[in-house]
Amino acid sequence: MPLFSVAKDPPTQTQIELAAASATLRIVEQPAELVALIDCCRAGDKQAFRALFTQHRERVARVVYRMLGPSADLEDLIQEVFVQVFRSLKDFKAQSKFSTWLHRVTVNVVLMHRRQAKSRPVFDGLPLLEPADDKRAHADEEFARQERVAAFYRLLNRLSEKKRTVFILHEIEGLSPTEIASTVNAPALTVRTRLFYARRELALLLKEEPYLAHLTAQHFDEAKELL
Amino acid sequence: MTDPSLELRGVRKVVEEVKAAELPPIRWAALEAELFSELEGQLPAGAVRPPKRIQTAVLWAFSAAAIVVLGLVGQSALKRAGNLSAPVESSNVNGRTWTKNQMNTSETRVGDHFVASHSDITIHDARLGTWTLFLGGEATLLQQTPLVLQLAQGELRAEITPGLPPDSFVVQAAQTRVAVKGTIFRVHRQPDRIRVDVERGTVSVSSLGAGRQVFELRAPASGDFALDASTGRVWEPNPTEWVSGAQAKTAPTPTPALAPRRVSSTHLAPETLPTTLSLNQVNAGVDSLIHIASTCLSETLASNGQLALTLVTQARLSVSPEGQLSELEFTPPLLPKTTECLRQRTRSLNFGSSQKGAELFRRLEIEVSPSEPAH
């Protein structure tokens, strides 16, 4: 989904409820190989689960990384996702694609982890006090890129948990508001509202991070040139 | 005032970078070993779970029974029953994966994979000596005689019996080959380079490819090498310098274990190794900086009573290619006395070497604890 695309007319609440109701009744056909693999896993076959792990680990890792940002907990959470998958496979009713179900499990594990982490005091590299010189070039571009990504996650961490979640799921993971609504158990309209405020807050916060402030300045310069 | 849509474009740009960001290196083998070790204790996924209260009671009863069974039947029967609470051998696609911490070479065979997921793994060989794969490391046995190990990640230390023929123990890490005579040495595979420390004897470091260049390190010595050993730097303890081709540079603090003796180096390449700084090293450096700042502030503010306080400031750090702090600025600034104290004490800090160095910005929260009054 393109970023910040102009949304079509949002579906009405009745339409969403109807879609949700039909979704609960629908059985999505899965590839035969995957069905066999899942059946073996449900029967407790460790080798089958090892195969499932190997097939899906990269995808899970990517979702965890995007949800969490640079973190030392990445590997622990990937492991936790697969422990949850192992425990919950019996609940997989094929009402969605396996990959969608796996994505949902992954997101929930990360959200749970973040909720638990909130009770622990951590230093998360909060925003800097004053923007530094925007034009200063970083000597090491790859390192600077890593820093920009880390700085962006610092900004994301300043949003409320609800806004942060919908922003990542929509803008980075590419989920539609309806899909996010079913994941976070909120109406799609609420998801859109959170998304709107998340974007606006991020845009305002951007200039407070020296690693990112130049982005706004750069676009401002580009706009001036056009004028 | 800036148009908000421009700022949204800024967000869009960084979102694209986040989407394009590559995953950090993940220790899949270790993760898999840990996961399946944990799953061994789980119920089969298809089994119906009893209600939690009953489940707890059953768990206690089962635990008590398991203790009795353990005492009666012994460890071998336990393995047959599939209870893998202690790390032991588990199956692997290309052979076997070992995670237990003490082994003998007679137990191993070519293709075996060693994953130090729970603790260090130490392998004893009556003829060769001992090698240890440190926690978090992964290695594969490629050949028995001469012994060739492929170090996939982490750190390995080998203590090889003196007097053996050259190249009787070889460690390969990425495209780098580290071959030893009787010696004690460490090889640390990092994401972008290979670090070799020689405590005793001699090792040669070369590229696995054709036309290989050989670096020779005589103890005590350390070297940093590109993943293919095409370039490298060897530490000369006396005088305290890193030698990189004809260009000598100031060295980071030498490893304490290394006594000041000259290392002979051959074929030193002109380029330094990592293109980027390691975030872990940078974070470790920033942690040390915070600690030093806390000490300096405690000393500076010693006369100001017994209050504990937290000071928040933004630091700009310029890191030289050698990894040392070339500039340090605080906003808001610290007291001149404190700043001077910091400048003096951060000289030995190292943030890791890179080709161009970097400029860092960090918000520091410095906790100052009350000092004992001086008598």
Image (tube, coloured by chain):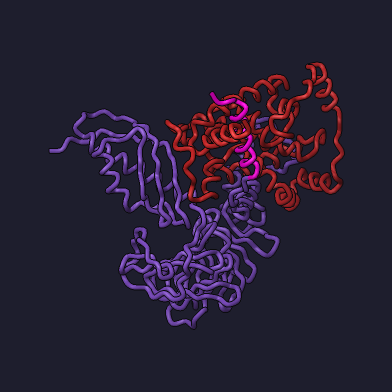
Chain colours: A red, B purple
Viewer-side residue, B41 vs B324: B324
**x 63%, y 44%: residue:** A78
Q: Nearer the viewer, residue A26 or A162?
A: A162
* Picture mark count: 0
User: Where does residue B108 sit, x and y in percent of width and height?
Assistant: 60, 69
Residue B173 placement, left or right of B254: right
Residue shown at the point (35%, 64%) measured from the top left: B257
Please, is residue B49 above or below residue A141 in the view?
above
Percent position (x, y) of residue B288? Answer: 37, 46
Please identify the quadrant where the C terminus of chain B is shown.
Answer: top left
Q: Quadrant of residue A227?
A: top right
Residue sitting at 56 percent across and 41 percent down? A149
Name, please, the residue furthest toward the front.
A227
Q: Residue furthest left?
A: B375
Magenta region, residue range: B1-20
Q: Tell me the chief SS of the magenta region.
A: helix
Is residue A83 shown to the viewer in this render? no
Kindly indicate the quadrant of the structure image that contains residue A31.
top right
Relative to the observer, which residue lies in front, B77 or A182? A182
Residue B28 is situated, as x and y percent measured from the top left of the image, at 62, 53
Q: Is residue B80 magenta?
A: no
Tell me residue A103's x, y (percent).
Answer: 71, 37
Q: Please determine whether, in this image, residue B349 is positioned above or below residue B45.
A: below
Is B135 on the left or on the right of A43, as rendered? Answer: left
Magenta stretch contains residue B8: yes
Residue at 45% across / 49% down in the picture?
A: B358
Instruction: Say whether residue A216 is left or right of residue A40.
Output: left
Task: Using the rendered image of the protein, determine whether residue A130 is visible from the camera's viewpoint.
Answer: yes
